[in-house]
Image (cartoon, rainbow, N blue to C red):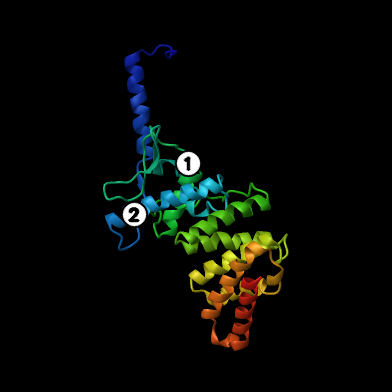
Amino acid sequence: MRALAGIGPGPLFALGALLFALHAQADENLALIPPAGSTKESRVSDLKQCLAISAEIAHLANAVTPFEKIPLLGQRTGRFLFTTTLSGPRPYADDDSNPTRASGFVGFNNDGSPVSDRYVICLLAKGYRWPNSVSAAMEQPRATFPPEVETKILYEAGRIYRYRGLPQEGERLLKRVVELDGKRLPDAHPYMVQDLGEYAIALLDLKRIDEGLQYVDRLLPAADQSPKNLRKFQAWIFERYAEVLPQDRGPEYRSKLLDTARKLRSE
């Protein structure tokens, strides 16, 4: 290793320590504010659950789209997770188990990764929030994926968020999927059937029945033309919506949903 000219090992060590201290001071620990009513035990559970969810999504979609990153407000997420060579990533937290961005270097990926990005996104979807000192980036990142790639990533992420009990985040991503795929695919296309179905389920989970029925209406006309692997999927959706149908839709519409579901299950 080459020494800096004119600086011996003592001054060099002191200079390094000073630079490290200045960096740490400029980028001190930043903790997410937990939801009201949370406890240390619930926060520990949230951290573990979000790490598991983010790893599951990254296994299927090892890239994060700019649209997914909007809740991050331009913040880097790498130091929210600590990684060693002997284990996978682990949540970094303060003494009260609040998710925290460390100011150190060793064991942290400073820039972040698909896992750390989605780990923080998951926590934000659970009701954690940035402190007031964090404001949105001046310019949101621009799209860098072709629509067919972006929708595949968002579909997998949105589906898992919804399935793992975060329908709000699932709805946010799946709505984007429906918008993008709807510009290039007909509603009868298998991808659109999956998009519309998953989005309708997310809205059902959120009890936004009237909104969800708009997408059920788009599934109905070509339901009997769907591939076999999607027929029971649609039948389940029609049956669930029939159970919570608003009165203004009337008994005829309910019968149509149930009759279509019955036909799909019999084929």
Quadrant where the C terminus sits is bottom right
Disc 2 marks a residue whose amino acid type is Ser
Residue displayed at 34% across by 20% down: 13
Instruction: Of the two numbered discs 1 and 2 on the same chain, state the one appearing first in sequence.
Output: 2
From the viewer's perspective, is 186 left or right of 138?
Answer: right
Where 199 falls versus 90 (above or below)? below
Most foreground residue, 224 or 54: 224
Most foreground residue, 125 or 228: 228
Residue 198 lies, in percent from the top left, at 57, 64
Most foreground residue, 190 or 260: 260
Task: Select label 1 or label 2 by which is in front.
Answer: 2
The answer to whether residue 236 of the structure is visible from this angle is yes
Residue displayed at 62% across by 73% down: 216
Where 111 falls versus 193 (above or below)? above
Quarter-of-image position of residue 107: top left
Residue displayed at 42% across by 13% down: 3
| Label 1 crowd bin: few (<14), some (14–19), many (20+), radius 10 Å | some
Residue 15 lies, in percent from the top left, at 36, 23
Check residue 45 in the rendering and tell me which mark sits there, or answer none.
2
Quarter-of-image position of residue 10: top left
Q: Secondary structure at mark 1?
A: loop
From the viewer's perspective, is 57 left or right of 266?
Answer: left
Where 199 falls versus 129 (above or below)? below
The answer to whether residue 75 of the structure is visible from this angle is no
From the viewer's perspective, is 214 left or right of 28?
Answer: right
Check residue 112 in the rendering and tell me which mark sits there, or answer none.
1
Disc 1 marks a residue whose amino acid type is Gly
| Label 2 crowd bin: few (<14), some (14–19), many (20+), radius 10 Å | few
Check residue 232 in the rendering and tell me which mark sits there, or answer none.
none
